[in-house]
Amino acid sequence: MPSPFTSLRACFNRRLRASLLGIADNWLQCNDYFRGLAGRWKACGKDPRHSHVKVACRFSRLAYLIVAGGELVPHPCLLPRSAILDKLIEFHQQHQTPPDRMLAELQTAADRLPRGQYAHEAVPLVKRLAEARIARRRGPQPIGEILPLLLAKLGIGDVPSMVAGVRDLS
């Protein structure tokens, strides 16, 4: 009599499995938390394939929580958590992204943040804004124009009007 799992084995997604195991390989090589877990499992006499599968399962659970749950997951391998918007700004500055595209992507990222994370995300942005206002460089400073709009979206602080002579309605 054939195994009841024969049909399941024939239907799995090989590319998805390969992707998950590739992510597990990267985590086992680059992440201290998962490298430590794999070391403990190896000391218990587990097969190295066991570690890869366990790490892939943990990743898939975390990814599902993040994608389906719409929230940031506090996991030991992700702590301490840095501000997402601050990292995104740093990335765009390093890659010299045009200000309009940077603003659009920052607003999209801010829309996806849970409201409970707004205060945490605003702290480094307020610091960047203060640094941009203090800097006495000549020429355009697009980050100084983008940050007030982003902070307004997060509900932090007052945003001065962009046009001279126009009063804020707040």
Image: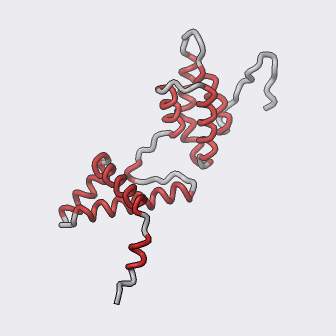
Q: Quadrant of residue 110?
A: top right
Residue at the top extreme, as displayed: 138
**Quarter of the C terminus within the rendering:** top right
Percent coordinates x, y for residue 63 in the rendering: 47, 56
Q: Quadrant of residue 19?
A: bottom left
Left or right: residue 152 versus residue 138 is right
Left or right: residue 73 versus residue 141 is left
Which residue is located at x 37 percent, y 58 percent? 18
Percent coordinates x, y for residue 142 in the rendering: 60, 21
Between residues 111 and 128, which one lies in front from this camera angle? 111
Between residues 116 and 57, which one lies in front from this camera angle? 57
Relative to 78, say whether 129 is above or below: above
Relative to 131, say whether 59 is above or below: below
Left or right: residue 147 versus residue 1 is right
Which residue is located at x 63 percent, y 28 percent? 100
How is this picture coloured?
Answer: secondary structure
Which residue is located at x 34 percent, y 90 percent? 1
Between residues 19 and 56, which one lies in front from this camera angle? 19
Q: How many marks?
A: 0
Percent coordinates x, y for residue 81 in the rendering: 45, 44
Left or right: residue 51 versus residue 97 is left
Relative to 154, say whether 42 is above or below: below
Which residue is located at x 81 percent, y 30 percent? 169
Percent coordinates x, y for residue 131 in the rendering: 53, 21
